[in-house]
Image (cartoon, helix red, strand yellow):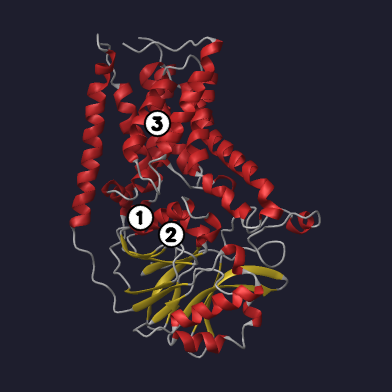
Amino acid sequence: MSPPMVQPSPSRRWPHLAGALVLGAVAATGLAPLGLWGLTVPALAALIWLLARASDPARAFRLTLAAGLGWFGLSLSWIVEPFLVQPEIYGWMAPFALLLMALGGALFWAVPVWLAFRIGTGWHGRSIGIVAALVLSDWLRGWIFTGFPWALIGHVWIDSPVAQLAAWLGAPGLSALTLLAAALPARLWRPTEARAAGFAPGALIAALLIGAAWAGGLARLAQPLPADRDIALRLVQPNAEQRLKWDPEWARVFYQRLLDLSATPGPRDLVIWPETAVNFLLNDAAPVLPDMARAADAPLILGIQRAEGGRYYNSLVALDQAGQVTALYDKFHLVPFGEYIPWGNQMAQIGISAFAAQQGNGYSPGPGPQVLTLPGIAPFQPLICYEAIFPQHLRGLDSRPGWLLQITNDSWFGQVSGPYQHLAQAQLRALQSGLPLIRVANTGVSAVIDARGQLRQTLGLGEMGIIDSALPGAMPETFWMRWGDWPVVLLMVLLLAGTAFGRWRPAQ
């Protein structure tokens, strides 16, 4: 027996929409920094129950849109922070940026759910179709319009043993687990005199499903890790506040911090500075590169801007101990409207430019993912800031690196949720790839992350200092690195097709 469809009167529609909004926001508390996944699953369960009982596709669309506004409005609240670095110029944009980002994310939920509702029939078709639609939505957000795979549903598990599932099935697999567990209580609902008791069978199976994933994760975490490499790393975090970073007087202070921290006594085979660590171009840096190398007393990697052929790049460079450039990488996946905007030169004429780019009207993209090799250092794949949220950039390289390096300037993201969500995604990249990830941030959180995504050492937000660490060892190539997200994506497509077949199958 299926539960009755909801046919609300106009006076009851707004409370239902408000309820969906609240459920979306409650579900988002499972993301970093709160990590309340125990609220995420029940909130999504209530939402799926509400959606599948909707009277028509249009109502399901509206309810999902409201829920998406709650989820993305809370999870992406940090998006206002970049506009408040120079509030006198960009501050007026902050509320509009949050509203548009939340609305855009909500549409990524609402349109697939509307489609699932259209092609599905009955309780079975709708509940399973909603699961498949939202998982596919999470995956598509990593690709459409240059991609923005932030605040995926499966990200609520990153700091739990359940996250180890991502070594096989990636973030979409975590989203599928979450949504399936949330759908089971309603999917297996049976009418009883005590209506709430009808959810018990599905809730029990959902708990067993999550418990099995948790136990499997614990078993994987209990296995020994490969030995550390005999490479001593020094991560340097200068804590240069974004609002002061480009001020000429403060820039000298921050530069001296980098030199002093690098020169702190202790063993180091490689010193690493964060993204855009200095306020001058590589083109103008020749007089000071030897000073930087002397302070490091080891090969040095740093983030720096550079110009070539009238274009500007957000780059990572490696220096030897004589201050000579030995390797170069240009960021290729740029932040839309932050590091570049369409028709940038023309838009700059009316006062609109990419506010994160300090040179020109925006950066130009580099050629793509690379593996860099330095003498005596294991080959590594560089990732500059935003690039680390895209798992697809880890696959398809000509050779497998020994580790991942993310340099970043998370001071753009404020002090509340953004930097922690960014860090969590770096942990997921390490877990998915089976490679350790070294993260060097301007204001935090700098971290040494092992090949299972576990934080080994961190330097928190707003702190100045160094991390000295051996380079963790790499694990064998994971199933996800070989197959990517495709097994989960194909399964979700088949589930959607199955709901459509259930609708169109001739009556027997």
- Which of the marked residues, 3 or 2, is nearer the chain's N terminus? 3
Horizontal side of 129 relative to 450 (left or right) equals right
* Quarter occupied by residue 282: bottom right
User: What is the three-letter code of the residue carrying label 1?
Assistant: Gln
User: How far across and how far down the image is residue 350, in percent?
Assistant: 80, 53
- Which of the marked residues, 1 or 2, is nearer the chain's N terminus? 2
If the image is split into quadrants, where does the C terminus sit? top left
User: What is the three-letter code of the residue carrying label 3?
Assistant: Val
> Pointer 1 and pointer 2: residues touching (CB < 8 Å)?
yes
Q: Is residue 125 above or below residue 405?
A: above
**Residue highlighted by disc 2:** 394
Label 3 SS? helix
Q: Nearer the viewer, mark 3 or mark 2?
A: 3
Label 1 SS? helix
- Alpha-carbon distance for marks 1 and 3? 23 Å
Report whether residue 318 is seen: no
User: How far across and how far down the image is residue 386, in percent?
Assistant: 52, 58
- Which of the marked residues, 1 or 3, is nearer the chain's N terminus? 3
- Alpha-carbon distance for marks 1 and 2? 9 Å
**Residue highlighted by disc 1:** 432
Residue at image x 68%, y 52%? 90
**Residue highlighted by disc 3:** 131
Residue at image x 73%, y 57%? 344
